[in-house]
Amino acid sequence: MNSRRSEIALFAVLLALGCVLYAVRWGLFPSQSLHNEMWRFLIGDIAFLFLQVAIVTLVIDRLLRNRERQAMRRKLNMVIGAFFSELGNRLLDRIVVADTALDEIRTRLMPTQSWKPADYVAARTALRAHHAHIDISACDLHELKVILEADKRFVLGLLGNQALLEHEEFSELLWAVTHLAEELSVRESLEDIPPADRAHITGDVRRVYLLLLEEWLEYVRHLQSQYPYLFSLAVRTNPLDPSATAEVTQ
């Protein structure tokens, strides 16, 4: 509020000074022809001011904002890449086996070198329509707990990254991962879980799983357009592909 008032006060002072100077000039040069010239130049200056504002605001400022946004996006993609390299791929690999309905859309979530932007759009659409059925008995909760506890500081560090403020979906994923880690860590035993508690944990795992899948697809799309060599490895180690292997076979 104080900053806004300061800007208004500065504008008023500058406007008043401009009017005073024009009045002084008007008084110092009383000739009618000079007055006409003053009006002509004043109108011309005001007209040019509008053009200047239009050029600076609508063209130059927009270009600068776009460049800044692209730079921020590149930094954000680096953070997302670090997340998947350190934790995300392992999480997805451990959880995906628990989705008993994945075969319905598995082939639509396996990017290849020939994929176009439209293929990623179709994959995202299929994913959002997918009703994942998570059977946590097929998921090693103890292993998940160990993995999440080992990378707890890493995830909290990512949450403190200011660049993530520009990406709400990824921030939501990190919060979901953090919550799942807390849920698993506060339980003394993950064996013989009561039905109600099992349903609760299943919901937490499902949330992380779906958010992971969506962000993974977007991350792989970015790799294909910007880093083909990283994209190649991501495709060869696709957590959704049961036959995936890091070795180059063809």
Image (cartoon, helix red, strand yellow):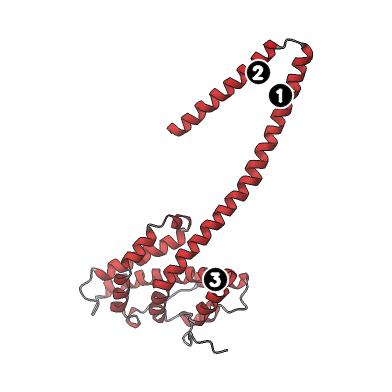
For the view shown, which residue lies furthest in the front direction? 28
Identify which residue, 65 or 97, lies in the foreground.
65
For label 1, count other residues whose C-alpha is less than 10 Å away and answer few (under 14), some (14-19) or many (20+): few
Above or below, 42 against 249 in this view is: above
Residue at point 23%, 68% (across, down): 186
Residue contact between numbered discs 1 and 2, judged by CB atoms under 8 Å:
yes
- Distance, label 2 to label 3, CA atoms, is 60 Å
Q: Which mark is residue 223?
A: 3
- Label 3 sits on a secondary structure element that is helix
Badge number at residue 22 = 2
Q: Nearer the viewer, residue 54 or 190?
A: 54
Whole-percent x, y for residue 131 in the image:
46, 74
The amino acid marked with disc number 3 is: Leu
The spot of residue 62 in percent (x, y) is 61, 48
Q: Residues within 10 Å of mark 2 (few under 14, many from 20)?
A: some
Residue at left offset 41%, top offset 61%: 172
Task: Quickly name the residue at label 1.
Answer: 42
Under circle 2, the secondary element is: helix
Determine which of the numbered discs, if any, sits on residue 144 in the image: none
Q: How many marks?
A: 3
Quadrant where the image shows the N terminus: top left
Outermost residue toward the right in this view: 33
